[in-house]
């Protein structure tokens, strides 16, 4: 066995077996938030460039964004307890606001796009203000 192959195997083993479930959970949530952030940045770029297709495409990606994996959902549920329905309402609000933004972009309506983007940003911020610190404690 070559030393390079052995080093790769050892690295894979360490990543697979020594990474804690909490780290994997934390990474899933971070990855999800980064995906949404990239979508918001692309929407902002679309607004600045009057690229309504880019806005609509990225708004649609937010509408249908993936949820956290099963382990993360369970951990979120355990952390939030009876607040899970409120958390879901805020998530649904983000999706609705993104859907409104998508429609405004498809209509090429700059005023409505700006208003919808502002409302989407507020919906994201409401969720962050209520849950970001608490969900960071999960790991």
Image (cartoon, rainbow, N blue to C red):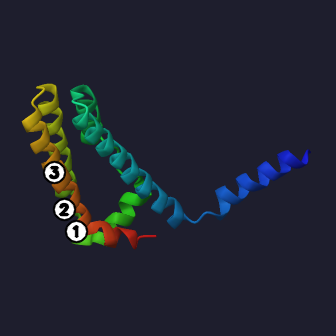
Nearest to N terminus: mark 3 or mark 1? 3
Instruction: Report the residue at 44% width, 52% height from top.
Output: 31
Foreground residue among 99 and 122: 122
Which element carries disc 2, helix, strand or loop?
A: helix
Disc 1 designates what residue?
130
Say if mark 2 contacts mark 1, CB within 8 Å: yes
The residue to which callout 3 is attached is 93
- Asked if the residue at tag 2 contacts the one at tag 3, i.e. Cβ–Cβ closer than 8 Å, the answer is yes
Q: Quadrant of residue 105?
A: top left
Residue corresponding to mark 2: 126
- Badge 2 crowding class, 10 Å Cα cut-off, few under 14, some 14 to 19, many 20 or more, is some
User: How far apart, in angstroms, are the residues tagged by discs 2 and 1?
Assistant: 6 Å
Estimate the spatial distance between the alpha carbons at disc 3 and disc 1, rounded to whole Å. 14 Å
In this orientation, does residue 7 appear? Answer: yes
Query: Which one is earlier in the sequence, the residue at label 3 or at label 2?
Result: 3
| Relative vertical location of residue 110 with respect to residue 135 in this rendering, above or below | above
**Residue located farthest toward the right when viewing the structure as drawn:** 1
Q: Check the image and report above or below for 132 versus 70.
A: below
Q: Tag 3, which secondary structure?
A: helix
Q: Residue at x 41, y 70 (%)?
A: 138
In the figure, is residue 125 to the left or right of 72?
left
Mark closer to the observer (3, 2): 2
Relative image position of residue 83 (x, y in whole percent): 21, 68
Crowdedness of circle 1 by 10 Å Cα count: few (<14), some, many (20+)? few
């Amino acid at each position: 066995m070559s030393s390079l192959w052995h080093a790769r195997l050892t690295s894979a083993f360490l990543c697979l077996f020594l990474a804690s479930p909490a780290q994997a959970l934390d990474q899933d949530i971070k990855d999800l938030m980064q995906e949404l952030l990239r979508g918001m940045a692309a929407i902002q770029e679309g607004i600045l460039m009057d690229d309504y297709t880019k806005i609509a495409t990225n708004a649609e990606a937010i509408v249908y964004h993936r949820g956290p994996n099963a382990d993360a959902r369970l951990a979120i549920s355990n952390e939030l307890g009876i607040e899970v329905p409120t958390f879901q309402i805020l998530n649904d609000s983000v999706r609705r606001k993104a859907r409104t933004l998508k429609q405004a972009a498809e209509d090429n309506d700059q005023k409505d796009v700006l208003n919808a983007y502002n409302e989407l940003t507020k919906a994201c911020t409401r969720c962050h203000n209520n849950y970001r610190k608490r969900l960071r404690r999960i790991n």
